[in-house]
Image (tube, rainbow, N blue to C red):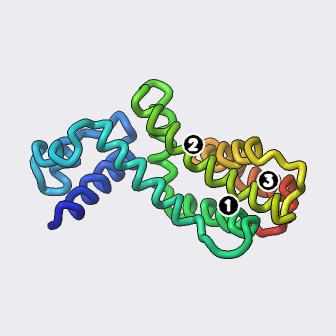
Amino acid sequence: MSKDDRRQALVRAAFNEIAERGFEGLRTREVAGEVGVNIATLHYYFPTKEALIRGVVELAMERFRSTLAPRGSSAEQLRDHLRAVRRLLAEEPELGAVMAELALRSARDPNLARIMEETTAYWHRTVRGLLRNAVRAGELRPDLDSDDVAAIIVATLTSMTLPAVAGAGRADQALRQLQVWLGMSFPTN
């Protein structure tokens, strides 16, 4: 197994531990054991638990970034992103479980809070850029505040990982309302 493959296997094992047992159930010895390495090898790749968690967040965000297709107009890219995130969370519920665990834990863990804030800021900038480009192209209303709307979109998509929101069907309601507010015509399925 190459170094990169081993590193990715450790991240995937940590991701799976969090999905199954929650953040509090993450044990680095079990992660190492699942990959078939000792704890010293895990620490070679991830000197701290924070570094391992950063890897898990990066894996999760790579899944979300995969929903951003650089084709079509900015409004079409945004529409497609909203649909794809909804589909991704439905098809990969463990992704939502991990992100919810990390978000909730970040309220009590300053290091994790910093990682989650960096991730959210990146996502916000990406969505804000799509909105600004769509406004400039005349695809969205000219009075739309790209920064505020990006915050609403990211908050809505983030909340979709929480069981109380996802389980109650509120995610579809929220996405439909975003569609109405933005004047976009697209199905949410």
Q: Is residue 123 left or right of residue 47?
A: right
N-terminal-most mark, 3 or 1: 1
* Label 3 crowd bin: few (<14), some (14–19), many (20+), radius 10 Å: some
Task: Choose between 134 and 107: the one closer to the eye.
Answer: 134
Quick check: 105 above or below 173? above
Total of numbered circles in the picture?
A: 3
N-terminal-most mark, 1 or 2: 1
Q: Residue furthest front?
A: 136
Mark 3–mark 2 Cα distance, whole angstroms, equals: 20 Å
Q: Secondary structure at mark 1?
A: helix
Is disc 3 in contact with disc 1, using a CB cutoff of under 8 Å? Answer: yes
Q: Which mark is residue 5?
A: none
The residue under the point 23% across, 64% down is 5
The residue under the point 70% across, 49% down is 153
Quick check: 63 above or below 20? below
Residue with the mark numbered 1? 82
Task: Choose between 167 and 182: the one closer to the eye.
Answer: 182
Q: Closer to us: mark 3 or mark 2?
A: 2
Q: Identify residue type, mark 2.
A: Ala
The image position of residue 182, as x and y in percent, is: 84, 56
N-terminal-most mark, 3 or 2: 2
Q: Look at the image and tell me whether residue 167 can be seen.
A: no
Residue with the mark numbered 2? 121
* Label 1 crowd bin: few (<14), some (14–19), many (20+), radius 10 Å: many
Q: Secondary structure at mark 3?
A: helix
Q: Is residue 109 left or right of residue 100?
A: left
Q: Is residue 105 left or right of residue 24?
A: right
Residue with the mark numbered 3? 178
Task: Choose between 139 and 113: the one closer to the eye.
Answer: 139
Q: Secondary structure at mark 2?
A: helix
Mark 1–mark 2 Cα distance, whole angstroms, equals: 17 Å
The image position of residue 114, as x and y in percent, is: 46, 33
